[in-house]
Image: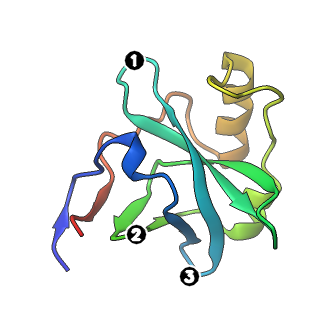
Amino acid sequence: MTKSKRLGSPGELDGLDVYADDGEKIGGVDEVYLDDRTGRPEWVTVRTGLLGLREHFVPLAGAVREGRRITVPWPKELVREAPRPGDAEDHIDAAEESALYAYYGLPEDTVPEEIEGDEG
């Protein structure tokens, strides 16, 4: 596997499978949220459950992409219990984003410079 620091465009993340670092599948990427300053992907929402009806925010900090798979350093149960911003259709407001950062134990404005991953 050839590693690179290429994430690609946000559209390339749509539909990728998201796994916890223990190998358990969390779900599939539904939406990609960009950092307001850099325009880089910062958060994704992941659909979970049998029918994919529940949506959860997951930070991309520490994520690794390998082909059609993104592995995040968060266990599935932590993701499933994450706070869900009310109306985050296009944008997460500052207070909701702060709550998500705190929940995941990240300093605010933790934007991944680039996500490691392979090109294929």
Query: In the image, is 37 to the left or to the right of 48?
Result: left
Dot 2: within a 10 Å radius of its alpha carbon, few (fewer than 14), some, or many (20 or more) residues? Answer: some
Residue 61 place in picture, x, y as percent = 46, 48
Amino acid carrying label 3: it is Gly
Distance in Å between CA atoms under marks 1 and 3:
32 Å
Above or below — where is 79 with respect to 98?
A: below
Give the residue type that dot 2 points to: Arg
**Marking on residue 68:** 2
85 to 7, vertically: above or below = above
Q: CB of mark 2 within 8 Å of CB of mark 1? A: no
Q: Are marks 1 and 3 in contact (CB under 8 Å)?
A: no
Name the front one of labels 3 and 2.
2
Q: What is the spatial separation of the Cα atoms under label 2 and label 1, in whole angstroms?
A: 27 Å
| SS assignment at label 1 | loop
Tell me the residue that label 3 is attached to: 23
Q: How many marks?
A: 3
At label 1, the amino acid type is Arg
Q: Mark on residue 18?
A: none
